[in-house]
Amino acid sequence: MRLLRSLCIAFGMYSRISVPHVKWNEENMKYSMCFFPLVGILPAAAVFGWWKLCCLLEIPSGFGAAVFTVLPYFLIGGIHLDGYLDTSDARGSYGDREKKLEILKDSHVGAFAVTACVIGAILVYGCWEGLLLMRTVRGAEALSKAVMAAGSGFILARAFSGLAVVTFPKAKDSGLLHLFSTAAQKQIVKWTMILVILAGVGFCVGVCQIYGIGVMISCSGMFLYYYRMAIKEFGGTTGDLAGYYVCMAEMSSLLMITVLILLRV
């Protein structure tokens, strides 16, 4: 029952799936982060299903790409996007550490956040439209591995993010990330995330091949960047920075896949 309650907290917090209400206490939250990568299965499955439907019904690339762009947010909600926007505002200010942390707490959306959101949406839309347009050149079945690789990016991004929650220094002693980190059984969460990442490596290399390798490079490279940026600019990680990483890892993975397709790898 304890694991089931932790599962409900993870899906209740990080997705829009309706789950039974569970009291947020240390006992129930111990293993919540262990289930964080499972949340990524929702957009991964939805993206692959929409790809199959686009190919079956020959849905126009423009409309198909638009649905691809917004589909994850119907399932996940805006919690990671909120972190991406807040962090973009904070980093765009070029202020000192205290100023950036203060901006993260500000509920207003600034110009840097809007710019980052528009650029991100155009990037994601363009990548998916390019992939859909390539159906006629490379064949839908041949590109299915690329779509599966993109789906694995949702899971791996959350596994790396969960690993950061229990291993990175914290920028402050408050907030959701601090709450989850404090309540977590850190060693169990850490090794669960490592096992998920290793399983992801096996799936990416064995099934998705070169596209999966590209996703692994993107997620792990962005993870190293995330660590350096969080320590240097904020003194540690926060919930907003964790959301920023998830979004950046997903976008960079999709961009890497698109580049590999265009290079006809």
Image (cartoon, rainbow, N blue to C red):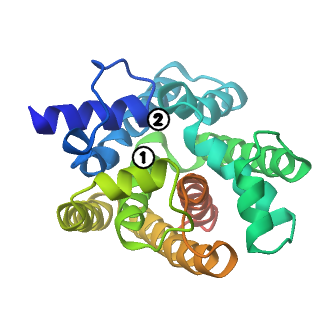
- Pinpoint residue 105: horizontal percent, then vertical percent: 70, 49
Q: Residue at x 63, y 76 (%)?
A: 229
Q: Is residue 12 left or right of residue 177?
A: left
Residue 261 image position (x, y, % from top left) = 57, 60
Task: Identify the residue shown where x is 45% and y is 63%.
Answer: 211
**Neighbour class for label 2 at 10 Å: few (<14), some, many (≥20)?**
many
In whole angstroms, how far apart are the C-alphas of marks 2 and 1? 7 Å
Which of the numbered marks, if any, corresponds to residue 69? none
Residue drawn at x 60%, y 34% as measured from the top left: 78
2 and 1 marks in contact (CB < 8 Å): yes
Q: Where 119 sits versus 140, above or below?
A: below
Q: In the image, is residue 50 above or below residue 249?
A: above
Q: Quarter-wise, where is residue 144 in the image?
A: top left
Amino acid at dot 2: Val
The location of residue 160, given as percent across then percent down, is: 40, 63
Residue extending furthest toward the left? 1
Residue 153 visible, this orientation: no
Q: Amino acid at mark 1?
A: Gly
The residue furthest front is 173
Q: Residue at x 48, y 66 (%)?
A: 219
Q: Which residue was labeled with disc 2?
A: 47
Taking 201 as reference, is 61 left or right? right
Along the line of sight, the residue nearer the viewer: 159 or 154: 159
Q: In terms of depth relative to the viewer, which is nearer, 155 or 57?
A: 155
142 lies left or right of 136: left
Q: Quadrant of residue 5?
A: top left
Judge the density around disc 1: few (<14), some (14-19), many (≥20) Cα neighbours within 10 Å: many
Q: Residue furthest right?
A: 111
Q: Which residue is mark 1?
A: 151
Q: Position of residue 93 (x, y in %)?
A: 87, 64
